[in-house]
Amino acid sequence: MKTQAYGYAALASFCLGISPVAQADLKPISDDAMGEVTGQAFMQVENIAGENHDFTRMTLGMDVETRVNVDDIQVGQIDGGTDFSASHLALGHIARADGEVFNGRTYNEGEVIPFEAQRPYIELAEDAQGLAGFRMGFQQARGSVSSHTTSFSGAMPGLKVREEVSGTIYDTALFAGEGETATNYRASHIGIVPNGDEALSCVSGTNCAPLTNLRSIIVGDEGAAEGDVAFTDGFFIGFQRDDNVAWQSLDGANTISVGKGVFINLPTNMTVDLSQLTGEGVDRLRTHQVDMGTKLF
């Protein structure tokens, strides 16, 4: 099922509106008739055993294409800080010119390039003390995420940075600020980690830059053809009561151990030049009907 996100409320209202006048007699269905019925459940519930927690995942059988703008968002405000703080957050974008290509499809200026999400789920983590955390995500997701982010708790797996002179491509890490080492908690900067040396500190303009320079990223995995973006199953936001909640990947092959508070996982296959990241920054995609520019926010 594919529909626009805003259609769900209308559908629910319509169903609720007609339910008081619906009348029917219930009659048993024969085994032969039942054998001819095929379909897929609207909700799938899974119980998953973990090392320190037990998990219950509830997945909805629906697909969504959407474009969303949020002026300001702050999540996890406690202990004098914020786990995630951003303004002008957007999912999906609008083609800035004719001929813009995304995942093999060509768009004309002004056409919406939606954020695509399939089979959304909510997952609960429980231990002896009760609910230890929950997360929301999608079994498949791809599309643009744009923001002016000043505090980020989580990870951006797959984001690479290229050093142009040598051509070397580095993994990235999040930093809590100038002079700080790598962290996944309330980061304000992002940069390179040569040889996996996470003890390296952030020197803004040299090996790292403020997260506000990363104005748009594309969530997704590497596609089959050059420039294509495949769906990722790793996009989620988690809320944890305690440290060391080990969320399992949807195929059960790996775990992501996260700490107390909010954790956002944004998988991408982007590679950004170091000079661009530490200089003028990554341009913001067009996220408004009236084009607000590439660096307005």
Image (cartoon, rainbow, N blue to C red):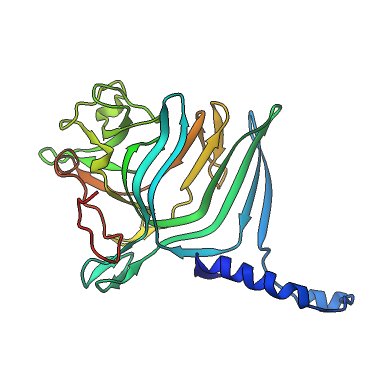
Number of disc labels: 0
Q: Residue furthest left?
A: 165
Relative to 207, is 153 on the left or the right? Answer: right
Residue 158 in sight in this render: yes
| Residue 251 to residue 116: above or below | above
Which residue appears at 43% of the width and 63% of the height?
A: 66
Residue 155 in sight in this render: no
Residue placed most toward the observer, 264 or 104 = 264
Q: Give x and y (percent) for residue 254.
A: 52, 38
| Residue 204 to residue 9: above or below | above
Relative to 158, is 249 on the left or the right? Answer: right
Q: Quadrant of the N terminus?
A: bottom right
Which residue appears at 26% of the width and 74% of the height?
A: 108
Residue placed most toward the observer, 164 or 236 = 236
Give the quarter of the image for residue 144: bottom left
Relative to 82, is 136 on the left or the right? Answer: right
Q: Give x and y (percent) for residue 133.
A: 59, 35
Q: Give x and y (percent) for residue 109.
A: 24, 72
Q: Give x and y (percent) for residue 263.
A: 47, 37
Relative to 1, is 35 on the left or the right? Answer: right
Which residue appears at 14% of the width and 40% of the height?
A: 279
Which residue appears at 21% of the width and 48% of the height?
A: 282
Residue placed most toward the observer, 157 or 60 = 60
